[in-house]
Amino acid sequence: MNKRNIFLSAACAISSLFAFSSCDDETSVPEPPVVTEPFQYVIVATSEDGTYILQTNDISSGQISIVGNGIETEAATAWIFYGTQYAYDLVYRQGDPAQVAAYELGADGKLKKRLNTYQMPSRYTTYGYFDNYITTAVSVTRADNTPGLSFNLLDVKTQSITEKVIAAGNFTGNGETANLSGILEVGDKFFTGICTTPAVNAGGTTGTATAYPDSVWVGIFDRDLNCTLLRDNRLSYATGRYRSSYHTNLAKDDNDNVYVFSSAYDNRTTKPSGALRIKKGETRFDPDYFFNIQLLAGGRHLFKVWHITGDYFLLQMYNTPNQTAEAVWSVLAVVDVAKKTYREVSGLPALDKIASVGSTPYAGDGKIAVPIVSDNEYPYLYIIDPVTATATKGLEVIAEGITAVGKLTY
């Protein structure tokens, strides 16, 4: 009760002693209205002719077309939404340095490109953001012919790029070279999964599989790229693999507890696809937490993970149980990491009708919007309610595909 209401209640009590009157009709001070910033949803759609960035104020229903709308942009391999300020596209150029462009909403609410287009000093195999930096990383050979990790740091404020290279040989102490998987900002640090591979000689890696498929490593980096290493042997490495990319399988809840998901990608591992936890502020795995997702999923392995809200996470699963060799992952499931429950999402197209699932969904207002392309219709954003694990059709996009969806404010 606030001070004004305490005073009024006391006054009512005193008055009732003498005048037998009542203050029952006295009302409390109303809460101030919640002020929300104006916003637009941003949708990246594709066709044979190009890639287009569209905007709309509603993704729960309706229709939008790439014809006569949006900004045409270069086809990007990845999209990073830096909060609700900027959307960055990362163009992968195989062995060449990556190119990056950024988009924002102007004061009029219209989408526009930031002035600069950036070229990273090196290529990338994983990415994310922390602090003020859009960050990419890749394993490299240093000038002294030893293995290294190259970090490209794009400052979103100054729009300047810095490259930092650190040693990567024998990074975890097992004699192998480190490859990073994802950049997850947690407080003033970032967490990343580490997958090690054998070194060829003094520099470079063979690209062959690790000799240690039954260990999971996580690195916690500060702003100076000093690393604290965490290891556990209850899961295999926390790395999502597709071609040359190492995507993140780490995600955090609303309280900054980090959940480390393993796809058990390596077919030699004896560990299941599951999750471990690192509690907020801790530098060790929680010894009392283990979530065997593969057991509940009928043998399916997870491919990717996104946080929705609270204890709910969305998993993208491999279609075929007990294998990761076939790159088909159309199954979506909701897990409650506190209750350790697994439910496959209903309301989606049949598995054999799903052509693709967008790589960058949007989580907000307690739900998650996932781009899905299915046979014989235009792509839709499907809105998934984690409480019921059900999906409903949202915005229809007149295009051939949807790569990403996010939200920007102005």
Image (tube, rainbow, N blue to C red):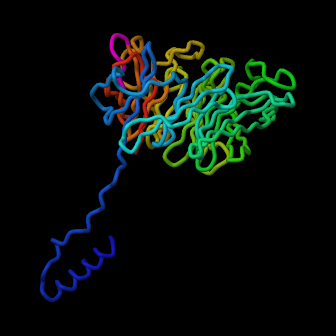
- Name the residue located 23 percent from the left edge and 82 percent from the top edge: 11
Question: Residue 237 at what x, y percent from top left?
Answer: 66, 29
- Name the residue located 55 percent from the left edge and 14 percent from the top edge: 327
Q: Quadrant of the N terminus?
A: bottom left
Bounds of the magenta span?
375-381
Residue nearer the viewer, 28 or 128: 128
Whether residue 110 is visible to the viewer of this picture, yes or no, is yes
Q: Quadrant of the C terminus?
A: top left
- Name the residue located 48 percent from the left edge and 29 percent from the top edge: 360
Q: In which quarter of the image is residue 388?
A: top left
Residue nearer the viewer, 128 or 218: 128
Question: Residue 229 at what x, y percent from top left?
Answer: 72, 41
* Residue 171 against residue 398 in the figure, above or below: below
Whether residue 277 is visible to the viewer of this picture, yes or no, is no
Q: In this view, does 83 lie to the left or right of 54?
A: right
Q: Residue furthest front?
A: 115
Residue nearer the viewer, 349 or 358: 358
Question: Residue 280 at what x, y percent from top left?
Answer: 58, 49
Q: Quadrant of residue 170?
A: top right
Q: Quadrant of residue 294?
A: top right
- Name the residue located 33 percent from the left edge and 75 percent from the top edge: 3
Q: Which residue lies furthest to the bottom in this view?
A: 18
Residue 378 in the magenta stretch? The answer is yes
Residue nearer the viewer, 319 or 117: 117
Dominant SS of magenta comes to: loop
